[in-house]
Amino acid sequence: MTRVKDFLIAAVVLAFGRRRPSRARPAAPRVVSAGTPDRRAENVVLGLFAAAALCAAAFIAFYALDRLGSQTQWLGLARGLSFALLAVACMVIARRLVVAEENAHPYPEPEHPDEQQTIEQIVEESGSRFTRRKLIVLAGSGAVGTLGLAALTPAASLGPALDTEQLDRTPWRRGRRLVDDAGQPIAAADIEEESFYTAYPEGASRELLGSPLVVVRLPKPRGIVAFSKICTHAGCAVSLYRKPTFAQTEPRPALVCPCHYSTFDPADGGKVLFGPAGRPLPQLPLFVDGDGNLRAAGGFTGRIGPSWSGVRQR
Amino acid sequence: MIRGLVRFVDQRSGGAPFVRKALRYVFPDHWSFLLGEVALYCFMLLVATGVYLTLFFDDSRSATTYHGPYEPLDGATVSRAYASVLHLSFQVKAGLLMRQTHHWAANLFIAAIVLHMLRVFFTGAFRKPRDLIYLLGLGMLFSAFLEGYLGYSLVDDLLSGMGLAIGYSVAMSIPVVGAYLAMLIWGGPFPGSADFWPRMYIAHVLILPLVIATLLALHLTLVAARHHTQFRESPRTTERQVVGVPTFPGQAPRSIGLMLAVFAVLFLLGGLVQINPVWLWGPYHVGDATNGAQPDWYLGWLIGGLRLMPGFDVTIGHYTLIPNPFWGGVAFPLAVLLVLALWPWAERKVAGDDAFHNLLERPRDNPWRTALGAAFVTWVFLIFVSGSGDRIDVWLGIDYVAQVWVYRIAALVLPVAVFFVTRRVCRELVAWEVLRRDMPGS
């Protein structure tokens, strides 16, 4: 048995170790300081490497298993653990297996006055043949600046920048029917108090800031009112209705935007009651047609959507 | 083997002197110096997971009908972008893991940058000759805000739609040019033309990552050129000499270990802790919004700024001049950016200190800076907290309207109080140290 082992070792040495006799290097002084071996730490690192490989293999297995429940969780666990085990192995290497050195090194020179001066000189002297330096620099900057401007000009194609008319676009005209989410006309009789309805213009895009409405029935003054659903502050949909569930302590009904809690008074033309909105919610006048359905009686009382410089307040 | 490789590389690149120097480059040792590295490793993982996500994402907002394993939305009209995210979350194996890990990494990325910056600020690491490094870092932080915002806006769920509506309104609110600018960016009135989604996409996956990567490369190059700062720990650590662990073998396993640990945490979070379940939010339509929507944490300060502003538009006659969102959405972040960007220069001027600094100060060593910094952080933090006032109302039952008034007053008063308290604490700490040092028998 021993002989076989010896033979094998000899064969391996002959096969791989025969390449060239290592040239004798002059013994250089150590750069990295020496330390004592730590076999226990090495064993720990080996174990951690094995465990990390196992977890990584588990990731592949979980990936391949089609019928696995909670696959995302298993995949995350396997991959996370394999990274964690490798991380711990690195920490053990850093703390136990790599020599602890504390080296000192001079900080780089704060500055190099000689080189600075030479650079300055090179730049200065290179221009010595120019007689009208300032003019040349001015003309050059002018040319480059204009070129830059020309390079930026195509950015104007990005959008209809000057066409701010588009910002006021709304499909609401006198006579246009209000429809619900499913596209059905809304009967005035179906609008109940203490409830909140979203309406859209019949036969027009719903994905315009000027389209969606909130419709509520007020107890006092009695009646149905409709407002643009888009908050005049930051363009979110006003989708909360604060109704007085206990009239003594709860304030009056109000429309509230969930983004920054701008609060509007539906009984007073959408006036701002609280929050950062700077102007009232535009109201849409309504009438009830012959079939009892709600229709617009005209356009909004104000500009829809968030404000911009130059927009009229009411 | 090693000799052969080294010789091969050196003969072809002439890089041996550089590599030898780099291997023995010295890293001063302090836990707080690792925060920047955490951010770096988050960025690497963001790029890796992000590239995977691009292989499945569709950057189109055109409408399609969803049919897939998520039954509550079966048959719903959604955008292609949203549908592709549902597909990637439910049908692509490991897709949800990658998406959630990406999202967690974004949150940790910005958190690590912020903590890193606080460390740099309160230890005076930004002083000459490292003011430029600090500015580059600040540039990365603000690029990362925009990058994160675009990332979750792309999904086109209800939350991203609400966020974009607010972004649009904030752009519109810029005095004089706002409406033109918004129309250019969105290609028309909100929700914008069909071009808008590809624009956001290319900005998110190419332009901003390139910007961040470039700033990062410059940041690290300058750090290496000027070497790390260090605390005054022993007589050996001086303004002229840096003391620490060499890159190899000392620092390398630590740093790689930290990288692996960051990856481990992010993948564990990505696999086990749900984040941004967009199928629950549903698709966005202009007329939809939900209560209690919260953006990713790093935008909380802007929500707070928008919410705290008292309700008024600056007007001339009947015409609006400055719409309200300008204050919270533009002026406030711009003020924060300006204060942070100008600080090194302002401090240099006021303190009359034009010297080179390689040694760090402990916060107590510079009571004025520490106190002003603490006051500033308090101010921003209060506004940040006010962005969650509605959640606090729900969780703790503290009335929202009352909270807003408390925040408005606290944002003005508390920073001043924090300034005086912090300055006093710093001075007392130093005095106590001197006392202890001079005590006989210590």
Image (cartoon, rainbow, N blue to C red):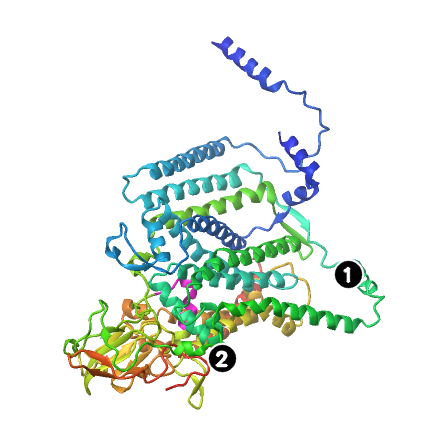
What crowding class fits label 2: few (fewer than 14 Cα within 10 Å), some (14-19), or many (20 or more)?
some
Q: Residue at x 41, y 35 (%)?
A: A51
The tag on residue A22 is: none
In this picture, residue B352 sits left or right of residue B368? right
Task: Please name the residue shown 43% across and 53% down the image.
Answer: B105
Residue interval drawn in magenta = B294-304
Q: Amino acid at mark 1?
A: Gln
Q: Secondary structure at mark 2?
A: loop
Q: Residue B90, image x and y in percent?
A: 31, 49
Identify which residue is drawn at 47% across, 56% down.
B109
Q: Is residue B295 magenta?
A: yes
Q: Residue beneath label 1, please?
A: A116
Residue ID for mark 2? B175
Would residue B72 appear left or right of B434 to someone viewing this image?
Answer: left
**Disc 1 element:** helix
Classify the position of the C terminus of chain B by image quarter: bottom right
Q: Pinpoint the chain carrying mark 2.
A: B
Look at the image and say whether residue A125 sits in the magenta stretch: no
